[in-house]
Image (cartoon, rainbow, N blue to C red):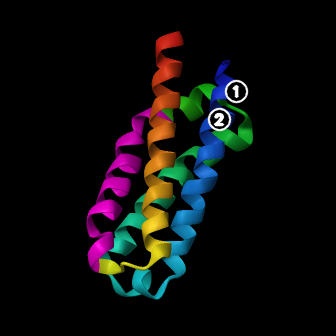
Amino acid sequence: MSPHELMLAVDSQLAHVWMVRAFLKHSDEGQEDDELAEVHRDLYDYMLALGGPLKEGNSEEYLKLARKKLGKLKKASEEFSDIQPQVSTHTNFQMAVASLRTAAEEVAKLLESGERRA
């Protein structure tokens, strides 16, 4: 996979992250719970950092930043997974945890596979 293709593959996973972030941000729980608000802010920060390089088509910078800030995405996913049962046991929140976890894991795998090929 070329760096440009890898950038696009990572970005397609971030579409899922964006939807989880939007769900959390606009939920009543997301507006009332400080820990949950921190999760959606961390998700936004990760994606915001990658937005400029994506728009410019700068795959090298995009991938560098994606790797550098991957810990933030993983931390947000783990934090959400940990606090979700206390925030809400509704199926929407359970599925949001599964979606975020899957997307974060896939981003990590993609970035790792790109490093091995570089």
In the rendering, at what x and y percent does residue 27 appear?
A: 50, 83
Asked where in the image residue 31 lies, by quadrant, the reply is bottom left
- Residue displayed at 50% across by 74% down: 92
Q: Secondary structure at mark 2?
A: helix
Name the residue tied to disc 1: 5
The three-letter code of the residue at mark 2 reads Ala
Q: Determine if the magenta segment contains residue 110.
A: no
Q: Quadrant of residue 90?
A: bottom left
Label ID, residue 52: none
- Left or right of 22? Residue 40 is left
Kindly identify the residue that appears in the image at 33 percent across and 82 percent down: 33
Q: Whole-percent x and y of residue 116?
A: 47, 13
Instruction: Note whether residue 63 is visible.
Output: yes
Q: Residue 46 location in percent, x, y?
A: 48, 51
Local crowd at mark 1 within 10 Å, few (<14), some, or many (≥20)? Answer: few
Q: Main secondary structure of the magenta part?
A: helix
**Residue 118 in view, yes or no:** no
Query: Hey, which residue is sitting farthest front in the picture?
Result: 91
Secondary structure beneath label 1 = helix
> Cβ–Cβ below 8 Å for labels 2 and 1?
yes
Q: Is disc 2 surrounded by few (<14), some (14 to 19) or many (20+) residues within 10 Å? A: some
**Is 59 situated above or below 48?**
above
Please name the residue that numbered disc 2 is placed on.
Answer: 9
Q: CA distance from mark 2 to mark 1?
A: 6 Å
Nearer to me, 62 or 96: 96
Side of 88 where 11 appears, left or right: right
Residue type at mark 1?
A: Glu
Q: Which residues are magenta?
A: 66-86
Q: Quadrant of the N terminus?
A: top right
- In the image, 24 versus 81, the foreground residue is 81
The relative height of residue 90 versus residue 111 in the rendered view (above or below) is below
